[in-house]
Amino acid sequence: MAPESEVSLTPAAPGGRQARVSRAIAQSLAEWRQARPPGRASPAANWPAYQPALAGRRDGRYAREVAAPAAPLPGPGEPGRLAALPRSRFLKVRTSDINAPQMRRVGFNTRLLLAFRRLLIWVITLIRYLNITTFDRMLGRATPQRRAGHLRHAFERVGGTGVKVGKYLAMRLDFFPWAVCVELAQMVDKLPPFPAEQAIAAVERRTGRPLTETFARFDPTPVVSDSVAGVYQGVLRDGRRVVVRVRRPGVGELFMADLLVLDWFLLAAEFLTILRPGFSAQMRREFRAAVLGALDFVQEARFQDSFRRAAKRSGRRFFTAPRVVFEYSNDEVIVQEFSAGMWMWELLAAQEQQDERVLALARDLNIDPAQVARRLMWISYWGWDANFFFLADPHPDNIIVGRDGVLTFLDFSSVGVIDPDKRAAMHQNMAAMQRSDPLGMARATITLLEPLPPVDVLELTKELEAVNWQALYIHASRAPQQSWRQRYPAVQWVGLFRVAAQYGISMQFEALRLLRAMLLYESLATRLCRDLDMLREYRGFARYRARAARLRVTRAVRRTVRQGFDQKTFLRLERVANMTSGLLARLRHVLSIPQANFTALIGKGSYAIFTLIKFNAQAAVVTALALLISGGLQWLTTGAAPTAPAVVQAVLANPLYPLLLLLLFLINTRTVLFHLDDVEVR
């Protein structure tokens, strides 16, 4: 028979099972109580005596395992027994204490009432612009430059997103004339400042305390007030002089309303076939991303800090960005250290106008305009080749030239990233330029235009080759008095945009931003130094990249020789093997694709027949609606059921009915014409 402290698990008589189980449970509880240290209320409060095993973090927010006193196991042939076993005690943890990481997205509410108000402003501005341009045509003074000036003033009068729209259109050199893009790029983004109390309230919301506890001095008059933010000066309690950028209250909702209005305009233009159907979809997405990027202060502060760190790692001490004070910055406030020096636009004006007073100040600061020009080109190459991102808007208003010619970049609301294929295409273009190979330059620039629509690639290559011949001739002439628009590589890029517009090629927005940024860098450098050779500057940057690569390889080889093959070496070998396997799989896939283009087999005639059927269906729907409306009106006016001939006669006599049919016919006809212009690729 089993001891009293244990209960046998072997079958027993049904009559006494309940009593035996009760006695066994009571005996087990008694043993458990005797095993507790004296004076303790519960085993949960006596962790050291039970030698706890921490299953989670050291702060005890997770389970702790309670080890019960060891009990001897039953011997061979002995029945099992009821006894205490180790168990876990879970502390109370709320689900809100565990925050899953989420991707931060910038978004603002869209108010329809505000959108309708902005729609009225845009319509009035459009009517005013059309009246001015029509009046110029009547007087015979309508020139591209004058129309571009009127368009610029129209965008500036709209305010808010108007300036952003104008600057975005200035980047679309593949769609709009050069004169329009140049004029729109000169728009001034200035608005009356908002009340300083709102800026102070935003800063206090971020710091969580009064302004006087954070700043020893704060200037309530803004230095700059644009459509996005106001910029203030201040001195922190620790003595650091800083610049405070506060987002304009309500600007997010205003911009979202303007974006909705622009969507309405462009969709209406596509419906009326003023624009090709689907033409504006990509442009609207790109513009929305650009506008939200300008409002995302957290992202801008991160880009600025990343740029400053990357500039320091480059080993060049002639460019940087202000340090961001992250403890006082958030999604509506950016606090950064103050940067001293002269503005780039001041140096440009002094160099072009030969202002001796400003040039003397530049010499006192040890600023050499020619050296600044070379550094600008180096930073341009470094941005798209060595860094993760490049500055898409290196405007002279956003660059400070400090002592010894150190360049400080201020605005990081517009940055761009290019993929490795386009980066390699840029290198190939520069290498072909050094070899005086216009065909190689054309093939490299075609990569920048990809993905291509259905076009004749051979004709496109010939057009680009002709443009490159002109650029090579201008570079060989080396005329020092030429403006930057008449020199390489501006001639090549402007010609590329003209050919892209001629063939209806919509370039990717990031490629456009890169080429526009390069044009801006080159224009600044050429204005500072007329005899600057872009190819020589690129060769200097290429030597820097070669030295950096040599140092990396040398260090890796020395480390391998000194330490032998480590796990990273085998990991690299595995990656090479995986890449080789992937390339072979892609090759098999390409070779197995059928050569027939089934989309092209449909043909343009089939599309025209389909559009004709669609027009007939639309006309039938319009006719049915017109008959119903006409019959209903006759029944309401006469009180009697109208006859079919009377209803048909009333519809045909209404001039609105044939106008609607004519409008539908024109829309469908233009859609077919758009499709007929496409080149079938077989």
Image (cartoon, helix red, strand yellow):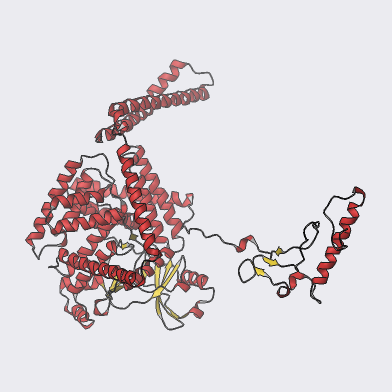
| Residue closest to the far front | 76
At which x and y percent is residue 256?
43, 53
Q: Foreground residue, 537 or 672?
A: 537
Q: Is residue 102 visible?
A: yes
Q: Is residue 158 visible?
A: no
At which x and y percent is residue 663?
34, 31
Q: Foreground residue, 309 or 134?
A: 309
Residue positioned 83% across, 52% down in the render: 10
Residue positioned 22% across, 71% down in the render: 375
* Above or below: residue 672 compared with residue 541: above
At which x and y percent is residue 592?
32, 37
At which x and y percent is residue 569?
36, 63
Q: In this image, 645 relative to 371: left or right?
A: right
* Above or below: residue 191 compared with residue 511: below
| Residue closest to the far right | 15
Q: In this image, 228 relative to 113: left or right?
A: left
